[in-house]
Amino acid sequence: MTTSTSQWSLGIDVGGTFTDIVLSGRDGSLHSTKTPSTPDQSDGVLNGIAKVAGQIGATAESLLADCGIIVHGTTVATNALLEYRGAKVGLITTEGFRDELEFRRSYKESTFNPRLKAPHAICPRRLRIGVPERVTHDGTVLIPLDEDAVRRAVTFLLAEGCEAITVCFLFSFVAPDHERRVGEIIREMAPDLYVSLSCDVLPEIREYERVSTTVVNSYVGPAIQSYVSHLDDKLRGRGFTGELFIMQSNGGMLTASETGRKAVGTLLSGPAGGVTAAGWVGQLAGYRDLMVVDMGGTSYDVSVIQDLNPATTTESWLARYRIALPMLDIHTVGAGGGSIAWIDDGGALRVGPESAGSLPGPACYGRGGTRPTVTDANLVLGLLNPDFFLGGEMKLDAAAAERALTEHIAEPLGMPVLDAAQAVSEIVNSNMANASHLVTTRRGLDPRDFALVAAGGAGALHAGRQAELLGISSVIVPGAGPVFCALGDTVANLKVSGSRTYLARLADLDLGDLNRRFEEIETEARGRLAGQSVTDDFDLRRSLDLRYEGEVHEVVVPLRTRTRRITALNLEATIRSFHDLHETLFAHKDPDQPVELLTIRVDVLGLREPPRMKGMEFGDEDPASALKERRRIVYADGAHETNVYDGARLHAGHFITGPAAIESWGTTIIVCPGQEALIDAYGNCIIENGRAGAA
Amino acid sequence: MTPETMIRARVVGGGFDTAADEMSATVTRTARSPIFNEAHDFTTGIFELKDGKARLVAQAPGCTLHLYAICPAVQAALDCFRNDLHPGDLILASDPYDGGTHIPDHVIIQPVFADRKPVFFPVVRAHFADSGGPVAGGYNPAARDIWQDGVVVPPIKLYERGERRTDVFDMVLANNRVPDWLLGDLDAMRGACLTAQARIERIVGRFGIGETRAALETNIAYAERRVRAEIASWPDGDYYAETFIDHDYQGGHDIRVACTARVRGSDVTFDFTGTAPQVNGFVNSPIANTLSFVFVAIASVIDEDVPVNEGYIRPVTVIAPEGTVVNPLPPKPVGNCTCICGAEIAEVALLALSQCAPKRVGVNCHKLPLAYSSGRYEDGKPWISLNFHGYTGGAGAAYGTDGWGLYPPLMTGVILPSIEMNEMQYPIRIEKHEYERDTAGAGRWRGAPGVRTRIRFLAENITNAMLAGVRHPTRGFCGAEDGPPNALTLIEEAGRTEVTEVIYNRHLAANTAIEFLRGGGGGWGSAADRPVDEVVADVANDYVSAGKASEQYGVVVDTTALEVDQGATDQRRTKMARSQPG
């Protein structure tokens, strides 16, 4: 492992409202701050660096001069896609197939509704041009590439003002030559244009998935590329001589220059930090299987980490476009603090997906919101302290919350306002628990085998109840809650995911050839990890997408070998785990049925030296010194007089019996009746749930 | 309602919905036949047995034409095994004249017990790649009776008390051309039911059976209230519409499907009196199929957040006179009913509703140019290709949106196979699959353009093809144009042949191609009302030619510069307005 002589490393996460900074020192010290995000995200980043530098008595310049690594989670690509503000993209594709992007394999988000509108066209038909060429599934060239047609197409697209061009031909994952040739022609004609070839972005079978992913790459590519180089220039202008890394959707990080080339890989750059932080915090607390939940203002995100490996998926949809790259599997439901409670025309109480956001926000924010939200219900139930929101920086209007709930929920349903608030709370809890359930069971997992890591401002309010509903026995509320994603950025490893479709029956697989193909992908992946000096300690993980012959969906099965060459025995063991995994996931297996291989995958991790963390000594158990007040809080089982503690005054070793509330800046932790909480050596709050085992 | 009741209803309802979703995921991922796993031609749901009646309590989004159809099928199976159900039983059924639709759509039913009684029934309804009978693939245009459609399967037990009944399995497999696929599909369906069973047992374990059932009843009553609220917003009245089936593949033409939607308060009756008598060909629709397509029409006008359960059905009555094409008597053949005349049933119901709820309706039917082919791989194993890419298209407009994508919503649970995957699995090459200019029904909102697809067969095969939607293509709504007709062309070495109605069990030599033109969707509202800039955008994107822009929309625009001739446009549009009735 290379050792950097620099004193500091920075993790920087840009969110919708705040830019979070974590500064980590070689001596194990940790500093953090928040600053408002700015329209040009790099301004907020520089502001944050100056602010955190102040905490160690330094200037931004002096800190940057002694900073070896900056790891950055950014929403530039995400926002470009979600707000449809990406580049003007042209597509060159096989003649006769230019509408596959729009066809979406016939998928529509609604199975009934003829009024559902088409997704925004990020590459409209005028800019999709078919050119004569065709190869077959075995790589035979049936129709040679018509280079004149390609030149005409490029000329047209340039005249139309395209800022990026995607090239996607049928079967290019078998025979990429035609795509590569088009790439050369474009570079001759427009050397600076952003070009994405599908054989580079996603060399896998299934043309719709490939074209959609590659078009999105072109759509967000110019934005992220220019942002990253702009930020890099700015940092260097302030004296930064270290290396800038960008968090990737697969949960790892990559150098800034590599990031621009595969821009689609940064769509989950922000949340990737959170999941990484959860793994790190979980490990410190002694857990390896984690369910990570993040409750914000509008949504609730759930993901799982198994044996410290975050679950990834190749089945994501974002902004109604299909992204088939391996990305963290984050399941999102519309349940946040700002989710609005309402009664539909069938008389049912509903919560979300509409959110009051931060403006006007919940009724209790006093910013003009009149409709009741989850936060309003929590306030009425006593879970939130009106005088200690964001550490007292913002007063909550309890009367406004009660008014909103009374008018919109309690009176129409003919129930007391407290009952209405409780109903709102339990329904949002149930929505969240169902989401968590789906995330685990669709992977053949049992939620009860996981520890719950609660991130996000509102997560800790509901985590205790989630543990009860899911039958989970331990909850971890990280001490670094408010800057959680940035913390993850400081501990992330480098990671490149590579893949190649390789269709074969396992019974007649040529092991030599398989090994060669694996080496090719590995070499490519390692190439993308070159040009950095953070680490030379690499970990190779290989997997096979396997299925029974005739199935069309695959199961990703890890290859259990540490040797360079995959042996016949390795393969046999992998097939056995395929059968077992198939049974775990789908309740049946058939060991007599032939198994086929579809795609081979490689993850190359560049392991960073983990930051040294000094655990705190345990003090006495009795938290009486941190007791702030007693107040009545209504839980699922009714009202209880509750001890409320000041989070800032709690220290390692404090032991708290539920019911209890712990209030810190930006987070309130609710410990339900029957639960126990402990502050661990790293400042995390661990809640033990006695009522494990429910549905 | 107490908060507890309300909360429990959401929690239990959410749990059952999640169970149905998990079933669906299991089937998709593990089934063997492409129609099942790539095309998702199946639906999963959970039923409850109450007072001797099977009622739907949860349903996963899927192929919506299976929606209602599973109800009578489950009822038939439960009637058959009423006092003979045990934990570990698994029932298979497909009988068009006892709760079924067409024979390929089989149901698998598993009882889940509570307090030693069978209470819940996870069900998978799915289209089998083959179902015996005279032709491979289950669509026999020459059928003159139900036995020529395929092998009828009355409710039978595949498993009894957890034990596989080998003799029954052998009987089923012996009557199938692709037993390996079928075996895999049956495993997948059983796996789905077992997944649901585990989930249901956990819910019942948490709340108790009484509370669970009460919570489900709350949800059913809720769905009913939502549906009634929508119907009550329509003006009372009798709304009549009619449409026609092209032909019955046996020489009968222009077969009338008539429907009066009678709206009274929060109830609606669909009365098919006036519909043509049953016909000799395989386009008759058994009652479960008719109900299913009425339900598809209803579902498409109701807000989609209403949970799909028994409550949906309660405000709706269907009158389908016996002996008509929408309620035939045995043994008339019914093999094509899930396309024709299912399409016409949904279409006529929506045309009737367009008179009282115009802003809710849009195309929700599929008049497909069907063709399927079968042959043998080099190793002798059989293959059946449904040539799915050829039928895709036909999405219509609705108030506020153009038609888009491929299928109308009815079929959007169906995921089109990947072209690359298809070419690896079958001896075929897809040479074209693209929108065809000027094949969209014009309107204030236009339909999606039609799709031209050419599939070349690299090996000899037997092909059956059935054309529909030519004499009577997909209808437009509220003054819009209909979608253009479908077309089917056979491209052999000897030359091109236009298929007029049907080709039956025809031997095709290697290198023969079929070209499909799936007509576009119908429009909504008058084309003269379409804003000029939207017409220009259509010309820019080559959905509409400059010629048709002028002819259909009255917009005069040149193709290269995309400039509008305002004077000529005003003139054309004024003329169009004058020639419009009313």
Image (cartoon, helix red, strand yellow):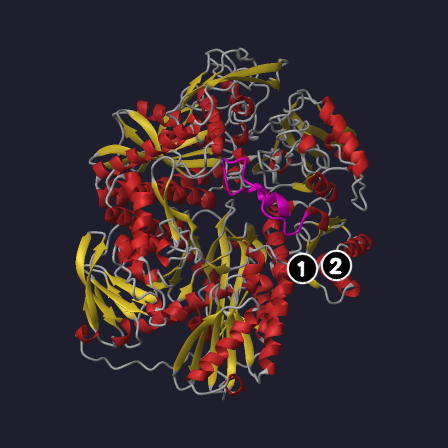
Return the residue nearer the eye: A54 or A386.
A386
Mark 1 is on which residue type?
Leu
Rendering quarter of residue A357: bottom left
Q: Give, as a single range, the part of the protein colored magenta.
A: A101-124
How many C-alpha atoms fall within 10 Å of the one at disc 1: few (<14), some, or many (≥20)? many
Q: Is residue A118 in the magenta section?
A: yes
From the image, give the main secondary structure of the stretch colored magenta: loop
**Does A139 appear in magenta?**
no
2 and 1 marks in contact (CB < 8 Å)? yes
Q: Is residue A17 left or right of residue A437?
A: right
Residue A531 image offset from top left, x and y in percent: 60, 78
Circle 1 residue: A197
Residue B493 seen in the figure: no
Q: Secondary structure at mark 1?
A: strand
Q: Residue at x 47, y 87 (%)?
A: A58
Total number of numbered discs in the rendering: 2
Chain under numbered label 2: A
Q: Position of residue A350 (x, y in %)?
A: 36, 44
Residue B103 drawn above or below residue A30: above
Rendered image quadrant of residue B577: top right
Q: Which residue is mark 2?
A: A182
